[in-house]
């Protein structure tokens, strides 16, 4: 084997290396959050956790399960201080748990501020929007990319369950 | 000799091109869901019809490779122990009262394939009463049985995710 042959062989090995590296990547765990144990959270505990609004905000939330591709939380809104939001990467599967309120969705957002990659909040709706009254037991699925806003009815609080899944 | 090396080289390098294509195949190839609103009344209505030959009902909202959302209704009888080897159940009670019996040793279950069993009996299980607003998550591999309290209907929303 000549020096040239060795050089060719070395080049080949280097060229083939990404094939192994890529396979290794492809086999990396998809969701590397640890497995969850059995968990029971009574209604009282969730209600208590939602009693305190987030500092400087008019809403509260309580995570119950958090993964790379999905998470579950309970959230509460009051009748003021709500703003539109849009998620480019996440789908909201929402069930109303208690209270009364409304869901406004559609159109576009003007003046919204980015709060995280693919997330924007605030500003105002423009274009064709729909407002849907909501009450306990109602469900809606909000696809990624559609601006939406949840508000409690006057003098009420709105509690809901969110299954967030990655688009 | 050089020719043989060249052929070997091309063959060796091929997986490098093939693998990224595989890695980029869509993870969940179900089409994206459009906006959906279902009122509590519509969901109640959807739960009137029972599953074939059963007394319980389920209404699937969406169906994806890795998850689905389903509204369910159970009575105080006719329920079976369930076991899912690959799926986690995230349950929130919407109305009615009942219980979830979980853990322990499952005997006499019927295999339904794909890591699912139904029926059989649980011994040494834990009984957790359930009421509206309660949340329970049941990891894959934990047998469980959900019942409404005597004379009641238990309704809950289930978020099912594959492990």
Image: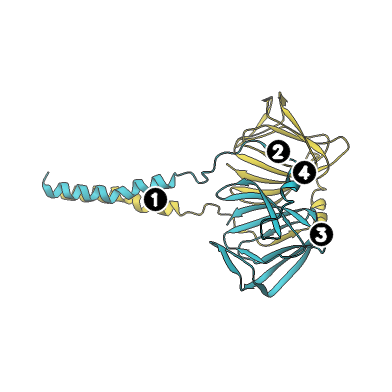
Chain colours: A cyan, B yellow
Q: Which mark is residue A40?
A: 2
Q: Which residue is mark 4?
A: A44
Between B154 and B92, the residue placed more toward the observer is: B92
Secondary structure beneath dot 1 equals: helix
Q: Going by the picture, which residue comes out furthest to the front? A: A55
Visible residue check, residue B51: no
Secondary structure beneath dot 3 equals: loop
Disc 2 and disc 1: Cα gap in Å? 42 Å
Q: Chain of mark 2?
A: A
Residue B88 in the image: x percent, y percent?
Answer: 63, 40
Q: Which residue is mark 1?
A: B19
Q: Nearer the viewer, mark 4 or mark 2?
A: 4
Residue A57 in the image: x percent, y percent?
Answer: 68, 60
Query: How many residues crowd around disc 3 within 10 Å: few (fewer than 14), some, or many (20 or more)?
Result: some
Between A150 and B40, the residue placed more toward the observer is: A150
Query: How many residues crowd around disc 2 within 10 Å: few (fewer than 14), some, or many (20 or more)?
Result: some
Query: Is the same chain shared between marks 4 and 2?
Result: yes
Disc 1 and disc 3: Cα gap in Å? 55 Å
Between A4 and A58, the residue placed more toward the observer is: A58
Q: Where is A34 relative to B25, above or below? A: above
Of the residues under marks 4 and 3, which one precedes in the sequence? 4
């Amino acid at each position: 084997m000549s020096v040239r042959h060795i050089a060719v062989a070395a080049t080949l090995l280097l060229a083939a290396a990404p094939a192994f590296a890529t396979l290794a990547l492809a086999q990396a765990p998809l969701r590397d959050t640890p497995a969850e144990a059995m968990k029971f959270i009574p209604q009282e505990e969730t209600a208590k956790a939602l009693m305190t609004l987030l500092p400087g905000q008019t809403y509260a939330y309580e995570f119950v399960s958090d993964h790379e591709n999905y998470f579950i939380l309970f959230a509460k809104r009051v009748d003021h201080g709500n703003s539109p939001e849009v998620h480019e990467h996440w789908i909201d599967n929402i069930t109303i748990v208690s209270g009364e309120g409304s869901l406004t969705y559609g159109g576009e957002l003007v003046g919204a501020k980015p709060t995280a990659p693919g997330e924007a909040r605030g500003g105002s709706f423009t274009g064709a929007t729909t407002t849907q009254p909501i009450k306990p037991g109602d469900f809606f699925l909000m696809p990624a990319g559609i601006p939406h806003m949840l508000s409690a009815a006057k003098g009420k609080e709105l509690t809901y369950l969110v299954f967030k899944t990655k688009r | 000799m050089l020719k043989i090396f060249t052929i070997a080289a091309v063959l060796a390098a091929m997986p490098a091109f093939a693998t990224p294509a595989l890695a980029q195949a869509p993870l969940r190839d179900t089409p994206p869901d459009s906006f959906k609103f279902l009122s509590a009344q519509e969901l109640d209505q959807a739960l009137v019809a029972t599953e074939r030959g059963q007394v319980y009902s389920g209404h699937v909202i969406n169906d994806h490779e890795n998850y689905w959302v389903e509204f369910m209704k159970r009575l105080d009888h006719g329920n079976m122990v369930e076991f899912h080897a690959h799926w986690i159940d995230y349950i929130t009670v919407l109305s009615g009262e009942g219980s979830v019996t979980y853990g322990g040793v499952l005997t006499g279950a019927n295999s339904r394939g794909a890591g699912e069993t139904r029926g059989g009996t649980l011994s040494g299980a834990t009984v957790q009463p359930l009421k509206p607003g309660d949340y329970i998550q049941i990891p894959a591999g934990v047998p469980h049985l959900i019942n409404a309290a005597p004379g009641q209907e238990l309704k809950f929303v289930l978020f099912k995710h594959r492990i």
